[in-house]
Image (cartoon, helix red, strand yellow):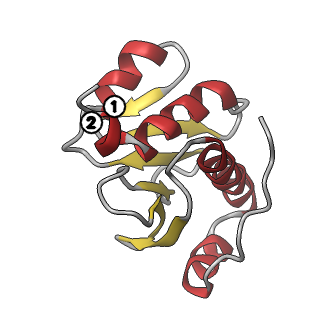
């Protein structure tokens, strides 16, 4: 996968990343990089909007009705893992469960959970991110 240079992080998003513990920040920064890499490889997705939704870093295509938002999060109550959240009213998590049941832990119909101690399953996560970034455009295919 081709690595791209992501744009400068907005100050409000950078503030959230800076508040994360170092290991969480590193894992989520790797996921952030992967989001921008996937967007660069996926026709019609760029440019991405990087913003905050519900106080968490969020990524979605700027063009309307292309994709669904992806949020990155961490909770103090689960310090050993972070999450990649998807809109709970989509079929995304159900699809991910079918395709990648052995590679991810799931939180309901809204998140993939990533343990700090596990290597990041980049290929599978990239596929999930691509599906989210093109969800509205591709859901009828």
Position of the C terminus by quadrant = top left
Check if mark 2's residue and mark 1's residue have beta carbons within 8 Å. yes
User: Residue beneath label 1, please?
Assistant: 93
Q: Specify the farthest residue to the front.
A: 44
Q: Position of residue 135 (x, y in %)?
A: 34, 40
- Label tally: 2
As helix, strand or loop, the secondary structure at mark 2 comes to loop
Q: Position of residue 26 (x, y in %)?
A: 75, 55
At 57% from the left and 42% from the top, the residue drawn is 42
Relative to the observer, which residue lies in front, 90 or 137? Answer: 137
Relative to the observer, which residue lies in front, 47 or 54? Answer: 47
Q: Position of residue 45 (x, y in %)?
A: 50, 52
Q: Position of residue 33 (x, y in %)?
A: 71, 53
At 66% from the left and 76% from the top, the residue drawn is 9
Q: In terms of image quadrants, where is residue 117?
A: top right
At 24% from the left and 44% from the top, the residue drawn is 88
Mark identifier at residue 109 = 2
Relative to the observer, which residue lies in front, 62 or 117? Answer: 62
Relative to the observer, which residue lies in front, 45 or 127? Answer: 45
At 55% from the left and 19% from the top, the residue drawn is 103
Drawn side of residue 137 relative to residue 60, left or right: left
Q: Specify the farthest residue to the bottom.
A: 11
> Reading the chain from its start, which is encountered first: label 2 or label 1?
1
Q: Is residue 75 above or below residue 104?
A: below
Position of the N terminus by quadrant = top right
Q: CA distance from mark 2 to mark 1?
A: 5 Å
Q: In terms of image quadrants, where is residue 25?
A: bottom right
């Amino acid at each position: 996968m081709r690595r791209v240079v992501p744009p400068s992080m907005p100050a409000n998003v950078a503030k959230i990343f800076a508040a994360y513990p170092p290991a969480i920040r590193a894992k989520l920064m790797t996921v952030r990089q992967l989001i921008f890499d996937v967007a660069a490889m996926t026709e019609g997705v760029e440019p991405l909007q990087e913003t905050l939704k519900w106080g968490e870093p969020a990524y979605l295509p700027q063009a309307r009705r292309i994709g669904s938002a992806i949020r990155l999060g961490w909770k103090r109550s689960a310090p050993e893992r972070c999450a990649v959240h998807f809109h709970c009213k989509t079929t995304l998590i159900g699809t991910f469960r079918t395709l990648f049941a052995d590679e991810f832990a799931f939180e309901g119909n809204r998140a993939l959970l990533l343990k700090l101690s596990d290597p990041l399953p980049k290929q599978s996560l990239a596929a999930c991110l691509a599906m989210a970034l093109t969800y509205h455009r591709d859901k009828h295919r």
